[in-house]
Protein backbone atom coordinates (compact mmCIF):
# COMPACT_ATOMS: atom_id res chain seq x y z
CA UNK A 1 0.00 0.00 0.00
CA UNK A 2 2.86 2.39 0.85
CA UNK A 3 4.45 1.71 -2.52
CA UNK A 4 1.19 2.47 -4.30
CA UNK A 5 0.78 5.77 -2.40
CA UNK A 6 4.39 6.70 -3.14
CA UNK A 7 3.93 6.01 -6.87
CA UNK A 8 0.69 8.02 -6.91
CA UNK A 9 2.40 10.94 -5.15
CA UNK A 10 5.24 10.89 -7.70
CA UNK A 11 2.70 10.78 -10.54
CA UNK A 12 0.43 13.52 -9.19
CA UNK A 13 3.24 15.92 -8.33
CA UNK A 14 5.22 15.49 -11.52
CA UNK A 15 5.88 18.71 -13.42
CA UNK A 16 3.77 17.78 -16.45
CA UNK A 17 0.69 16.95 -14.38
CA UNK A 18 0.96 20.18 -12.38
CA UNK A 19 1.48 22.23 -15.55
CA UNK A 20 -1.56 20.58 -17.12
CA UNK A 21 -3.69 21.26 -14.03
CA UNK A 22 -2.70 24.93 -14.00
CA UNK A 23 -3.39 25.14 -17.74
CA UNK A 24 -6.87 23.66 -17.33
CA UNK A 25 -7.75 26.04 -14.49
CA UNK A 26 -6.49 29.08 -16.38
CA UNK A 27 -8.22 27.79 -19.53
CA UNK A 28 -11.53 27.63 -17.66
CA UNK A 29 -11.15 31.21 -16.45
CA UNK A 30 -10.11 32.35 -19.92
CA UNK A 31 -13.14 30.59 -21.42
CA UNK A 32 -15.44 32.55 -19.11
CA UNK A 33 -13.83 35.83 -20.22
CA UNK A 34 -14.09 35.05 -23.94
CA UNK A 35 -17.65 33.72 -23.60
CA UNK A 36 -18.69 36.89 -21.78
CA UNK A 37 -17.02 39.03 -24.45
CA UNK A 38 -18.94 37.22 -27.19
CA UNK A 39 -22.34 36.87 -25.48
CA UNK A 40 -22.47 40.17 -23.58
CA UNK A 41 -20.69 42.53 -25.97
CA UNK A 42 -20.43 41.20 -29.52
CA UNK A 43 -23.77 39.35 -29.88
CA UNK A 44 -25.88 42.39 -28.83
CA UNK A 45 -23.99 44.47 -31.42
CA UNK A 46 -24.74 41.85 -34.10
CA UNK A 47 -28.37 41.85 -32.90
CA UNK A 48 -28.53 45.61 -33.57
CA UNK A 49 -27.60 45.09 -37.22
CA UNK A 50 -29.74 41.98 -37.67
CA UNK A 51 -32.69 43.34 -35.71
CA UNK A 52 -33.30 39.98 -34.04
CA UNK A 53 -32.58 38.22 -30.82
CA UNK A 54 -31.61 34.85 -32.27
CA UNK A 55 -32.33 32.81 -29.17
CA UNK A 56 -35.95 33.85 -28.71
CA UNK A 57 -37.22 34.98 -32.10
CA UNK A 58 -36.54 32.11 -34.48
CA UNK A 59 -38.69 29.11 -33.61
CA UNK A 60 -40.48 26.45 -35.61
CA UNK A 61 -43.48 25.36 -33.52
CA UNK A 62 -44.27 21.65 -33.54
CA UNK A 63 -47.12 20.57 -31.26
CA UNK A 64 -48.07 22.30 -28.04
CA UNK A 65 -45.04 23.67 -26.25
CA UNK A 66 -42.46 21.84 -28.36
CA UNK A 67 -40.54 23.84 -30.93
CA UNK A 68 -37.35 23.65 -32.95
CA UNK A 69 -35.13 26.46 -31.70
CA UNK A 70 -33.33 27.49 -34.87
CA UNK A 71 -32.38 30.84 -33.31
CA UNK A 72 -30.52 29.15 -30.47
CA UNK A 73 -28.64 27.02 -32.99
CA UNK A 74 -27.69 30.07 -35.10
CA UNK A 75 -26.65 31.88 -31.92
CA UNK A 76 -24.43 28.95 -30.94
CA UNK A 77 -22.81 29.02 -34.39
CA UNK A 78 -22.16 32.77 -34.04
CA UNK A 79 -20.78 32.19 -30.53
CA UNK A 80 -18.41 29.51 -31.80
CA UNK A 81 -17.15 31.63 -34.70
CA UNK A 82 -16.68 34.71 -32.53
CA UNK A 83 -14.98 32.76 -29.72
CA UNK A 84 -12.62 31.10 -32.21
CA UNK A 85 -11.87 34.50 -33.77
CA UNK A 86 -11.20 36.10 -30.37
CA UNK A 87 -8.87 33.28 -29.32
CA UNK A 88 -7.06 33.46 -32.67
CA UNK A 89 -6.52 37.21 -32.35
CA UNK A 90 -5.35 36.95 -28.73
CA UNK A 91 -2.87 34.17 -29.55
CA UNK A 92 -1.64 36.12 -32.57
CA UNK A 93 -1.07 39.19 -30.37
CA UNK A 94 0.79 37.13 -27.77
CA UNK A 95 3.04 35.63 -30.44
CA UNK A 96 3.76 39.09 -31.84
CA UNK A 97 4.75 40.30 -28.38
CA UNK A 98 7.00 37.25 -27.89
CA UNK A 99 8.67 37.88 -31.26
CA UNK A 100 9.38 41.50 -30.34
CA UNK A 101 10.82 40.39 -27.00
CA UNK A 102 13.30 38.08 -28.71
CA UNK A 103 16.47 39.91 -29.57
CA UNK A 104 17.85 38.87 -32.92
CA UNK A 105 21.41 37.62 -32.77
CA UNK A 106 23.73 39.77 -34.83
CA UNK A 107 24.97 37.88 -37.84
CA UNK A 108 28.71 37.64 -38.22
CA UNK A 109 29.89 38.98 -41.55
CA UNK A 110 30.64 36.22 -44.00
CA UNK A 111 34.37 35.57 -44.04
CA UNK A 112 35.93 35.49 -47.45
CA UNK A 113 37.56 32.18 -48.31
CA UNK A 114 41.36 32.17 -48.51
CA UNK A 115 42.64 31.63 -52.07
CA UNK A 116 45.85 30.09 -53.34
CA UNK A 117 47.93 32.80 -55.11
CA UNK A 118 49.00 30.29 -57.79
CA UNK A 119 45.88 28.28 -58.78
CA UNK A 120 43.22 30.45 -57.04
CA UNK A 121 41.64 27.40 -55.40
CA UNK A 122 40.06 27.70 -51.94
CA UNK A 123 42.46 26.90 -49.11
CA UNK A 124 41.82 26.29 -45.41
CA UNK A 125 42.97 29.16 -43.17
CA UNK A 126 45.50 26.94 -41.35
CA UNK A 127 46.94 25.29 -44.48
CA UNK A 128 50.57 25.86 -45.49
CA UNK A 129 50.18 24.06 -48.84
CA UNK A 130 47.43 24.29 -51.45
CA UNK A 131 45.45 21.04 -51.70
CA UNK A 132 44.91 21.66 -55.42
CA UNK A 133 48.37 22.51 -56.76
CA UNK A 134 50.52 21.62 -53.68
CA UNK A 135 52.25 25.01 -53.77
CA UNK A 136 53.64 26.32 -50.52
CA UNK A 137 51.43 29.16 -49.26
CA UNK A 138 52.44 31.74 -46.68
CA UNK A 139 49.97 32.06 -43.78
CA UNK A 140 48.58 35.63 -43.43
CA UNK A 141 49.79 37.53 -40.37
CA UNK A 142 46.35 37.79 -38.72
CA UNK A 143 45.89 34.02 -38.98
CA UNK A 144 49.49 33.18 -38.06
CA UNK A 145 48.97 34.62 -34.56
CA UNK A 146 45.90 32.39 -34.03
CA UNK A 147 47.67 29.24 -35.29
CA UNK A 148 50.56 29.62 -32.80
Image: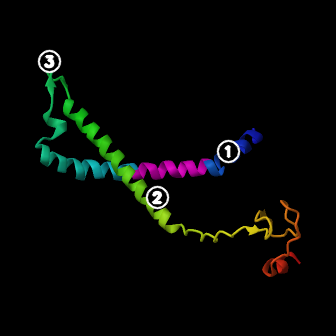
Give the residue drawn at x 78%, y 80%: 142
Image location (x, y in percent) of residue 18: 59, 51
Q: Marks 3 and 1, how far apart in space?
A: 55 Å
- Residue 44's place in the image compared with 143, above or below, is above
Label 3: which residue?
63
Q: Can you name the residue that lies furthest to the top here?
A: 63
Give the residue drawn at x 77%, y 41%: 3
- Residue 17's place in the image compared with 76, above or below, is below
Q: How is the image coloured?
A: rainbow
Image location (x, y in percent) of residue 75: 24, 38
Q: Nearer the viewer, residue 46 or 61?
A: 46
Label 2: which residue?
95
User: Quadrant where the C terminus lies?
Assistant: bottom right
Q: Earlier in the sequence, mark 1 or mark 2?
A: 1
Name the magenta segment's main secondary structure: helix
Give the residue drawn at x 43%, y 48%: 28
Residue 44 lies left or right of residue 120; in this view the side is: left
Image location (x, y in percent) of residue 21: 54, 48
The reply to whether dot 2 and dot 3 touch (C-beta < 8 Å) is no
Image location (x, y in percent) of residue 44: 18, 49
Tell me the number on the disc at residue 83.
none
The reply to whether dot 1 and dot 2 touch (C-beta < 8 Å) is no
Graded by Cα atoms within 10 Å as few (under 14), some (14 to 19) or many (20 or more), the crowding at tag 1 reads few
Q: Nearer the viewer, residue 43 or 95?
A: 95
Camera-side mark, 1 or 2: 2
- Residue 98's place in the image compared with 1, above or below, is below
Graded by Cα atoms within 10 Å as few (under 14), some (14 to 19) or many (20 or more), the crowding at tag 2 reads few
Label 1: which residue?
11
The quadrant holding residue 128 is bottom right
Q: Nearer the viewer, residue 5 or 27?
A: 27
Segment tinted magenta in the rendering:
17-30
Amino acid sequence: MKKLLKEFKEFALRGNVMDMAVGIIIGGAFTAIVTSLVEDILMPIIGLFGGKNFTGDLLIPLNGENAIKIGSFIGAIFNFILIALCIFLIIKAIKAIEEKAKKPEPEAPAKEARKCPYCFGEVDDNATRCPHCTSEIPIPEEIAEEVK
